Structure formats: structure tokens, C-alpha cells
Image (tube, grey):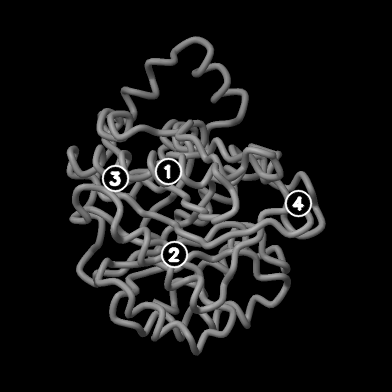
Amino acid sequence: MSITIPDLVTVRAQHPEAIAEAAARRERRPLTGDSGRLMIIAADHPARGALAVGGDRLAMAHRGDLLERLVLALSRPGVDGVLGTADILEDLLLLGALEHKVVIGSMNRGGLAGAAFELDDRFTGHRAEDLARMRFDAGKLLLRIDYADPGSLATLHSTARAIDAMAAHRLPVFVEPFRSRRIDGKVTNDLGPEAVATSIAIASGLGGTSAYTWLKVPVTADPRDMARVMETSTLPAVLLGGEVHGDQEGAYEKWRTALRLPTVRGLVVGRSLLYPADGDVAKAVDTAVSLL
């Protein structure tokens, strides 16, 4: 990075208007290029208090290191853009790393990891008007549905209104749905075919229009179920990376298989590419790009 962390702090302290100025002059691009595919690097985990990678509980707490990894990942051929919260995206704006990239703002971050209110996932991040003002290209929201937790109803309702607001601005919104439940107090996502299909069906019907809605879906526990699951909706979808638990090659094979399905248009992957087991970010990103 040509700009250092102290430089970023100085700009934020003395010239905060520089962020809006950088957003106004950023060179934009269409959401999908000629291939119709998307390769997005995700970095919205810290704002939910999820800082761990593998056994390092504070891996993503080092902002300078995270930004270096993001700038490297975004520089690799075939990477289309980034998903992040306002603080991270604005750092990347000031670093000049978002030129000709797809920029997706993370919208609901109120369901803090491990909190009693985790499934009442308030929209504490970007609003539709913020994304439009900053000339960002899309938004993303998380929708975890637990039939036993009343907080999920509040999240469903606010998600539907967020979809309406994004459509009013003609901005795409990526909805990441899960059927979830608490096991020993911890929220766990069900990756069985019935649960994934049900979550897709619920998410696809939210809001007054689905014209600008994309899905961000997990690969099922058994990848062979993905073809049937993805028949649930005609909305375009991207695959989320999730935890790979050390089996990077196994993850690549799951993604490769699912990417052949007609509604699947790309990948949105974060920690497994930014913090690969062997430490080689460029290699991990290039391998993921090759799957497309």
C-alpha cells in the first residue's frame, strides 16, 4: 500500500470530506462483465464481532494486515470487487483500491456473533440511500431464520423493507438466507437440502419486487444436493465461501461443481481466501478465480 495506516488516520482526522470526494471520482463498472460471472472478496466479518480465523481469535482485528490482504486480493486478475462495511470500504477508497471494481455494502450487522439478540439482526450498516450517495454498486444482507426465535420475524420484516428501498434506487441486493437454530446456545446454520431450499424460497418472496434481488447461498452439506436446491428460485445466485476447516481443496471442488448450475453466477468468499492455511493469498485467490 502506498498510503500507510498513519496516513489513513490523518486523513480521517483532518480531512474526512476526502472519503466522499474519493467516492465521487471513483471509476465504476457494470455489476457483471461480459462473462456474466462475479468474483467478490468478502470482508464484512469484523463489524459483527467475528474476528477469528482458524485458531487465531483476533486474526481480523489487525486492520493494517487485513487491508494489505484485501488490496492484494483486489489486484489479482479476475477479481471483480469487494463486500464490506463502511469503515473498510472507505479505507479501500482512500487507498485507491476500488477503481473499476464492484463495491457491495454490508447492510445489517446488528446480530452480533454470540449475542442473545443475534437473530434480531438490525440494519446498523449501510442503508439504500447511503449506497446510492456513495455510488456503490450493490448491498448485501444476512437473513437467518430460526422458527423458535422471535428475533427472526423482526429481521424478516426489516429485510423486506430493505429490499424495497434498494429496488427504489435500482440497486441490486444480495440476500444471504439460512435456516438456523441454537445448539447449546450457539446459532448454527442448517446446510441440509430441505433447510437450504426453504430459506431460498422464503428469501425469494420478500419485498414488493424481486427485480433487483440476488441470492448468496451456501453449498449444501452434500454438494450433490445443490442441483435440486437451486431449482427453488430463478433469482441469480452467488456461492458464499464460509469456513473451510483446513480442507481448501475440498472447498474448491464443492464450488467448482456448484458453479456449473444455471442460476449460480459467481463466488463471494472471505476468510478462506484472505487467510489461507499456507498464507499465500494470491495463490488462493487465483485458484478461486480459475473455478469461474
Disc 4 to disc 3, C-alpha distance: 30 Å
According to the picture, the residue beneath numbered tag 2 turns out to be 199
Kind of residue at badge 4: Gly
Q: Which mark is residue 163?
A: 3
Q: Residue at x 69, y 39 (%)?
A: 116
* Disc with the residue nearer the chain's start (1 vs 3): 1
Name the residue nearer the viewer: 218 or 147. 147
Q: Position of residue 21 (x, y in %)?
A: 31, 23
Disc 4 to disc 2, C-alpha distance: 21 Å
Kind of residue at badge 1: Ala
- Where residue 76 sits, quadrant-wise, is bottom left
Name the residue nearer the viewer: 282 or 200. 200
According to the picture, the residue beneath numbered tag 4 turns out to be 185
Horizontal side of 108 relative to 157 (left or right) equals right
**Structural crowding at the residue carrying mark 4, measured as other residues with C-alpha within 10 Å and reported as few (<14), some (14–19) or many (≥20):** few
Kind of residue at badge 3: Ile
Q: Residue at x 72, y 55 (%)?
A: 53
Disc 1 to disc 4, C-alpha distance: 40 Å
